Amino acid sequence: MRVFITRKIPDIGLQLLQDAGIEVIEWNERKPLSQPELIEYSKQCDAVISAGYNKIDAFFLNECKHLKVISLHSVGYDNVDVAAATKLKIPVGNTPGVLSGPTADVAFLLMLAASRKAFYLHNKIIKGGWLFFEPTADLGIEIKGKTLGIFGLGNIGYEMAKRCAGAYDMKIIYHNRSHNLRAEKELNAEMVSFEDLLKRSDVLSVHTNLSAETKGKFDKSAFQKMKPSSIFINTARGGIHNEEDLIESLQNGIIWGAGLDVTNPEPMDKDNPLLTMPNVAVLPHIGSATVETRNAMAKIAAENTIAGLNGERLPFPVNPEVYDQT
């Protein structure tokens, strides 16, 4: 059996694959694969581990319908046509549960960095702009006792809410498809409508999947309903916010600040105006970027692959309904 891996992954995953007798072909070039290249390599293999963004759409799947398993080195699977994979009886696996804490840490970091203009002021020092003290200059806003709004209160959103409630005694409100009883019991979280989430949040943090329903959800109309003193945080997917509308809203004082670990597109252009705004903090999609988390992701991705190649149920299937087919 042979697996194609679209980016270099931690050694723990490679070792598991090799110990299982699976031959590994790894893309080591520091540039994204084109879809034709992805198809070419995948046709030579029995499985694919997709690390980073690879377009696994119906066209790819029909070209590579021989694959026994597609294993994602990620929790998100918005780049995969899951329905098409299921129709072709290809199980798709992901890596849930292992990055909730680290991603929430990054959301918390971005909230603080934006609220105190940290990235902008760091660059000010580098440019020689720290000259003398001014009591009215470089002022941020305080977070303590404010209201945190969570859009998508799953595992990552819960971890963010727990940090904010514990460290800064923040009131937690959230918008979900269903109630999060754990958050309501432990954090006194209040489920609200999307309109109320926009109107009441001092910090609004996005922790939902990218889908047809959530794509572009945070646009000009949404930002206009937020407080002019509010901070928008997105560590989920860049496609959930309209970046041009976000830039305009910040420039016109519609909202106060933003913290982004995800952008649209990625990578972000170095001349993007968000990078020079005082009350904006941007990171290069590092929510899961700790040694411990990336090792855990590689381990799960390998385990999903091994199971799929052995004809066994994946430990973490995105499309468990594939096993109900005859």
Image (cartoon, rainbow, N blue to C red):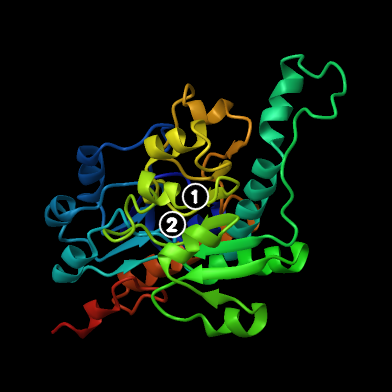
CA–CA distance between discs 2 and 1? Answer: 8 Å
Residue pictured at 15% horizontal, 60% vertical: 65
- Write down the quadrant of residue 281 in the picture: top right
- Is 271 drawn above or below residue 295 in the view shown? above
Residue pictured at 28% horizontal, 76% vertical: 311
- Is residue 148 visible to the viewer in this orientation of the structure? yes
Q: Amino acid at mark 1?
A: Ile
Q: Nearer the viewer, residue 277 or 292?
A: 277
Q: Amino acid at mark 2?
A: His
Is 305 on the left or on the right of 120, as rendered?
left
Say which mark, if any, is on residue 86. none
Quarter of the picture holding the C terminus: bottom left
Residue at image mark 2: 73
Is 149 on the left or on the right of 115, as rendered?
left
Residue 231 locus on image (x, y percent): 58, 48
Q: Nearer the viewer, residue 186 or 229?
A: 229
Are circles 2 and 1 on residues that touch, CB within 8 Å? yes
Neighbour class for label 1 at 10 Å: few (<14), some, many (≥20)?
many
Residue at image mark 1: 9
- Is 279 drawn above or below residue 320 in the view shown? above
- Of the two numbered discs 2 and 1 in the rendering, the one whose residue sits closer to the viewer: 2
Residue 61 locus on image (x, y percent): 17, 56
Quarter of the picture holding the N terminus: bottom left
Residue 75 locus on image (x, y percent): 44, 62
Outermost residue, right side: 133
Residue 86 locus on image (x, y percent): 19, 70
Is 236 on the left or on the right of 53, as rendered?
right
Residue pictured at 12% horizontal, 56% vertical: 62
- Is 124 drawn above or below residue 313 in the view shown? above
